[in-house]
Image: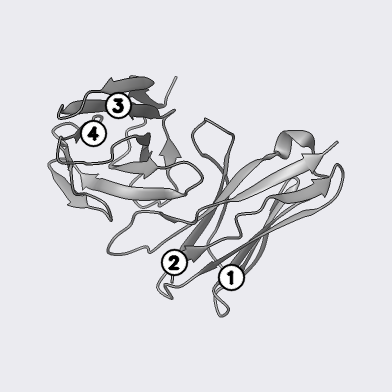
Amino acid sequence: DGGITQSPKYLFRKEGQNVTLSCEQNLNHDAMYWYRQDPGQGLRLIYYSQIVNDFQKGDIAEGYSVSREKKESFPLTVTSAQKNPTAFYLCASSSAGYTEAFFGQGTRLTVV
Amino acid sequence: QKEVEQNSGPLSVPEGAIASLNCTYSDRGSQSFFWYRQYSGKSPELIMSIYSNGDKEDGRFTAQLNKASQYVSLLIRDSQPSDSATYLCAVTRDTGRRALTFGSGTRLQVQP
């Protein structure tokens, strides 16, 4: 089945720890995105990548890092510099020439 | 001013009625417009896309776009309790930063 897989579904982070969220897609999509959603809020763009080996900062990139070494993978690292990381993280992808995006099932990150 | 504005709701309608959801956007360069449905605790699901002025119908859903007024709406006919969810409006340019910008969503409650 084609789709976008995020793992893990739930993640707990201790203060001062870096964690990496996985996002893999087998839709052959060129573009991939990371969004953050806080309770009762819309989605805010963290990073996006239109092609392999290239990515751009979104609106709230501070405290996060990404890589795009393979077309199908776009991992997000939440660093210790991100002071309020507890949120629902959503990865999405879209095909070249199209702007409609499809989402993975999300990772819920909690700082303990 | 937020780039994409939606009334947070909740919008409450009786079963079988028409639900009308509205969205305004500030970027006149926006070319593509989308409605996503998000159930509580789940990731957003694309339900409608619209690219040109006028109406676009798909089953019980009709999207309406007025670029001059910078206004997008979603009508849901014969509303069902299963339509109860948060509806997110998203817009994007077709050039430059081709990543979706989301509103904060409107919560719809369909009363049986």
Can you say whether A33 is above or below B42 in the image? below
- For the residues beneath circles 1 and 3, the answer to whether they share a chain is no
Residue type, label 4: Phe
Q: Which residue corresponds to mark 4? A: A74
Quadrant that contains the N terminus of chain A = top left
How packed mark 3 is, by other alpha carbons closer than 10 Å (few <14, some 14-19, many 20 or more), is many
- Cα separation between marks 3 and 2: 31 Å
User: Can residue A94 be seen by looking at this rendering?
Assistant: no
Give, as a three-letter code, the residue at label 2. Answer: Lys
Q: Give the CA separation, mark 3 to mark 4.
A: 7 Å
Q: Which residue is disc 1 drawn over?
A: B71
Q: What is the chain letter for disc 2?
A: B
| SS type, badge 3 | strand
> Which of the two residues, B95 or A8, is positioned nearer the viewer here?
A8
**Which chain contains the residue that carries disc 3?**
A
Query: Residue B2: which numbered mark, if any?
Result: 2
Q: Find residue A24 and name its label.
A: 3
Q: Nearer the viewer, mark 3 or mark 2?
A: 2
Same chain for the residues at labels 3 and 4, yes or no? yes
> With A98 as the anchor, is A33 left or right in this view?
left
The foreground one among A22 and B7 is B7
Sequence-first disc among 2 and 1 = 2
In the image, what residue type sits under mark 1?
Tyr
Q: Residues within 10 Å of mark 1 (few under 14, many from 20)?
A: some
Q: Which label's residue is closer to the chain start, 3 or 4?
A: 3
Percent x, y of residue B104: 50, 53
Mark 1 vs mark 3, foreground winner is 1
